[in-house]
Image: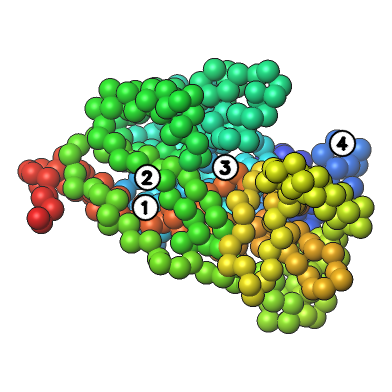
Amino acid sequence: MTQVIDPLSLLRQVRLRMTQQALADRLQTNKKTIYRWERGLTRCPQLVAPALQEILRMNRSSAPDKPASFTFADLFAGIGGIRIGFERAGGRCVFTSEWNEWSKKTYLENFGDGHPFEGDITQVAAKDIPDHDVLLAGFPCQPFSIAGVSKKNALGRPHGFECSTQGTLFFDIERIISEKKPKAFLLENVKNLVSHDRGNTFRVIREVLEGLGYKLHWRVIDGKSYVPQHRERILIVGFREDTDFTWDDLQLPPQGPDVVSILHPEDGSEEAERHYTTGPRAEISPRYTLTKNLWDYLRAYAAKHQAAGNGFGYGLVRPGTDRHTRTLSARYYKDGSEILIERGRGKRPRRLTPRECARLMGFPDDFRIIVSDTQAYRQFGNSVVVPVMEAVAKIMAPRILEIKAREAGEVTQPRLRAA
């Protein structure tokens, strides 16, 4: 007897991975219909069950074409920017943790769920995390960022490690490293981590990680070598054993791409996408052009602070003249003022589209964006520059493999770098 699969159960599984709108688009229906099925206002029809099963099947990671060189755990994963870099270097993800439900949908849509995926890492016992060679963690930066600290100071709230909601998440990294003892780790955070609390925050981080027996290497890297965006972030690399790792092996390109490279060409050479671009030439939707009121406000605000000797104001990018943008932040959805694209004399500037934001962070064009513009701006503003992660992963990988070989008895001594 053929087993009848409950389509509502499948729907609930799919909705963990997709927004209502994305699912409606996939099923060629509307968002209101999905809502009514979920709430039981109308019956979810049996005929959609095969389509839902196919979505679930496609969103589960298939076996890799070739064995991975090493494994990694992806903590505070966001939408998977660090993961992409380490997969390109030969790694395979065996565990993911991300608490934000919208980021989780984007992550699962692009990477599937072929391994354990947890939400709140504070509720996960370290012993329950699969063994892994490398721990990756872009732990929350707001408690240490310049903007985050200024805002918390203005509101009279604690920041850094005193921020109970985000600052103490570093110690979850500590307990997992202590339990699982990975061969290496990579931690990413804002440049201000080094100077926060007059250097005391970074001193504690160093003492904790070195106390676990790891040899540390850190460096502040500007993403503009790889993407047309000025974005400085600190990367902290640790190895459990002696290696010849050195940042000198990271050969930064002398000049990164021009900002024009991430903009929609609007000449028909790319297909129109969602509501970002429209028509046969895939021209940018008018929705991204600033309203007259907002543009007047931003200019008045900038003039006011310029008169007072402050540097506050919008960031206007002139394609063909300016090579880089300012740093894209998670607040970009509010007014887009940090990166505005000039559209020509007498025209109001526009925001970047979410796809352009993805390109600005180095995500490939086949990376699927299934959330609203607001959520997409937050996700890319909180993410990492993917090619930076790939470059660092590729200079870490040989040392990770060396430690693995040493443990397997294939190598007895760490290789020595030639003088």
Secondary structure state at the residue bearing disc 3? loop
User: Residue 10: x percent and y percent?
Assistant: 70, 43
Q: Which amino acid is tagged 1?
A: Val
Going from N to C along the chain, the mark reached first, 4 or 1, is: 4
Q: Are marks 3 and 2 in contact (CB under 8 Å)?
A: no
Q: Determine the secondary structure under disc 1.
A: helix
- In the picture, residue 128 is in which quadrant? top left
What colour scheme governs how the chains and residues are painted in the rendered image of this protein? rainbow
Residue beneath the point at 68% across and 81% down: 269
Disc on the earlier residue, 4 or 2: 4
Residue 109 locus on image (x, y percent): 62, 51
Mark whose residue sits in front, 3 or 2: 2
Calculate the distance from the C-alpha at mark 3 to the C-alpha at mark 4. 32 Å
Q: CA distance from mark 4 to mark 2?
A: 53 Å
Which of the marked residues, 3 or 4, is nearer the chain's N terminus? 4
Q: Nearer the viewer, mark 3 or mark 4?
A: 3
- Label located before the other in sequence (3 or 2): 3
Residue sitting nearer the eye, 398 or 309: 309
Would residue 85 be seen by someone viewing this image from the given angle?
Answer: no
Q: Quick check: 410 left or right of 160?
A: left
Q: Earlier in the sequence, mark 1 or mark 2?
A: 2
From the image, tell me which residue sits under label 2.
Answer: 219
Marks 4, 1: nearer the viewer: 1
User: Whole-Å distance between the Cαs marked 4 and 1?
Assistant: 49 Å
- Disc nearest the viewer among 3 and 1: 1
Q: Which mark is residue 40?
A: 4
Sooner in the amino-acid sequence: mark 3 or mark 1: 3
Type of amino acid under label 2: Arg
Label 3 sits on residue: 78
Task: Give me the residue at 64% from left, 75% from top.
Answer: 320
